[in-house]
Amino acid sequence: MANTTNEKHKLMTVKEVSEYLRISRASVYRLVRERKIPVSRVGKHFRFRKRIIDEWLTHMEKKNHDLQ
């Protein structure tokens, strides 16, 4: 149970998000700059909650499916 809770609240770096989404780090920064991906700032660094990224992905999948 604790592992699931940790996963929900896990903070990811730009590098981790790029690996998770299988896109370049430059693409992650572009999504951040265009305000297209949910992100938090901790000092000078961007951090992403895994749970929020998963929800965002689900939303994007539904949105793309609706366009078809």
Image (tube, rainbow, N blue to C red):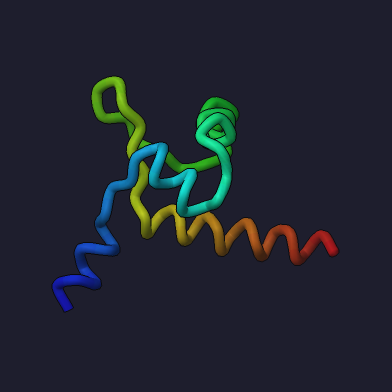
Up/down of 49 relative to 5, above or below: above
In percent of the image, x 65 and y 62: which residue is there?
Answer: 61
Query: Which is more toward the observer, 43 or 27?
Result: 27
Give the number of callouts.
0
Q: Residue at x 24, y 72 (%)?
A: 4
In the image: residue 18, left or right of residue 49 = right
The residue at the point 51 percent across, 34 percent down is 25
Name the outermost residue toward the bottom.
1
Q: Position of residue 53 (x, y in %)?
A: 45, 53
Q: Quadrant of residue 40?
A: top left
Residue 39, by quadrant, is top left
Q: Residue furthest left?
A: 2
Q: Residue furthest top?
A: 44
Return the x and y of residue 21 as percentages of the image width and height. Answer: 53, 52
Considering only vertical position in the picture, is 32 above or below 19?
Answer: above
Residue at image location 73% in from the left, 59% down from the top: 64
Image quarter where the N terminus lies is: bottom left
Question: At which x and y percent is residue 48?
Answer: 37, 44
Q: Is residue 68 left or right of residue 7?
A: right
Is 50 drawn above or below residue 12 in the view shown? below
The x and y percentages for residue 32 are: 51, 32
* Vertical position of residue 2 compared to residue 67: above or below: below
- Report the front residue among 59 and 23: 23
Q: Where, by quadrant of the figure, is residue 68 drawn?
A: bottom right
